[in-house]
Amino acid sequence: MSSVSPSPAEVRTTPLHALHLALGARMVQFAGYDMPVQYPQGLIAEHRHTREQVSLFDVSHMGQISVSGPQAATALEQVLPIDVLGLAPHRQRYALLLNENGGILDDLMLINRGDDYLLIVNASRKHEDLAWLQKHIGHSCHIQMLPDMALVALQGPQAAAVLQAIHPAASTLSFMQGAPLRFQGAVGYLTRSGYTGEDGFEIALPAFHMEAFARWALAQPQVLPAGLGARNTLRLEAGLCLYGADMDSSTTPSQAGLAWSIPKARRTGGLREGGFIGADVVLPQLAGDIPLDKIRVGLHAMERVPVRDSTALHIPYGEAIGVVTSGSMAPSLDRPVAMGYLPPAYTAFGTRIHAMVRGKPVTMEVVPLPFVAPRYRKG
């Protein structure tokens, strides 16, 4: 999430902008784009429809970066702490782009499409990510932004049934697996992944063809449009981080609870241990040689009071020790939930602290993440 609001002249639109307006969406500025936050049915209805059937989300504001060439995998391992060399064709991994201090510059999805690697990066960071990649590995591989490609997500338990009509093999894909896609003569790519905790797919197509695809999808009886509001409550329930809120360049993978994304091959004693930017900090933290000063936790509010982002977290009736980074009512649980950072001594499940909401303490309890169990199709 960008901390700088663009001027009106800089606000961009996605290829589905006209469709959003036609569907009655309420639009907001997000990461430099005019985006739908919700449609007439409302955020709660969109959230529940995604959990029960399938929703269409426009995520064309996100960046798509292609990295190719004989040395692409080796080069990417210099900037991403994952096993790129071991990533089979048409498989996808979650990855972190790190700075020299182990801070998270962005989180992204990396797909081995066979003839290149596709990085799906956050909208607010895509130009910075492109420059970082070009600076550090541009000499050994070909890197380019794909501005003529659009991206949507079909999320929900009936997503595979919808896609079967145009891609019969959709139901055979497993979570984090991809495949080429053709739609009305256009060549694209789909992956079984998403940002909601539900089963679903992300579909990349040339921008010129995306409105036709979106209209086709919305014509299916199971599909309704959903906006940024439902996307946010769904990802929060799933315990998924939002860049710029739950992590940033001052946050390391271990602090953010994302150490699981760094495989054994890249850790101390692994086949290709280290060798990535930020390893000098990240690996000692993973090994416990550098203590953590904060850790991301899940929080339940013990009252029906929503606890929003940036709310201070206190020792009961005492000093401030942390902060809420994401907070909202959770429609699936009908209670307020939040994520935030606390010192390690206060992160045990069951620990109670106070969130200061409009000057009054609201009791919060540390709980496991995610708040709602994911329903990805694995195997």
Image (tube, grey):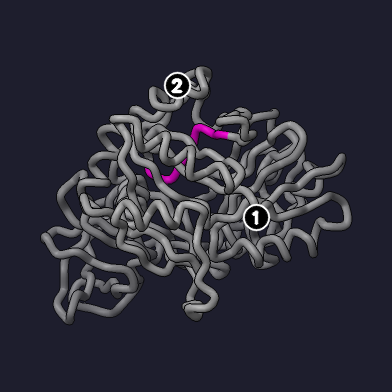
> At numbered mark 1, what does the secondary structure look like: helix, strand or loop?
loop
The x, y position of residue 16, in whole percent, is 46, 52
Question: Foreground: 10 or 98?
Answer: 10
- Which region of the structure is painted magenta? 190-196
Q: Quadrant of residue 89 in the image?
A: top right
Q: Are there few (<14), some (14-19), or many (20+) residues within 10 Å of tag 2?
A: few
Question: Residue shown at 39%/23% (left/top)?
Answer: 161
Left or right for 185, reference 167: right
Drawn side of residue 75 relative to residue 194, left or right:
right
Q: Which residue is mark 1?
A: 147
In front here: 81 or 227?
Answer: 227
Magenta span contains residue 123: no
Image location of residue 32, percent across then percent down: 50, 69
Q: Is there a contact, CB below 8 Å, between mark 2 and mark 1?
A: no
Do we see residue 17 in this rendering? yes
Q: List x then y, in percent, for residue 204.
A: 57, 41
Q: Which numbered disc covers residue 266?
A: none
- Give the image quarter of residue 158: top left
Rate crowding at label 1 as few (under 14), some (14 to 19) or many (20 or more) other CA atoms within 10 Å: some
Q: Look at the numbered disc 2 and give the secondary structure of its residue.
A: loop
Q: Nearer the viewer, residue 379 or 32?
A: 32
Residue 352, given in percent of the width and then of the height, sits at 22, 61
- What residue is disc 2 on? 165
> What's the magenta bit mostly, secondary-structure-wise?
loop
- At x 45% / y 42%, what residue is drawn? 153
Q: Amino acid at mark 1?
A: Pro
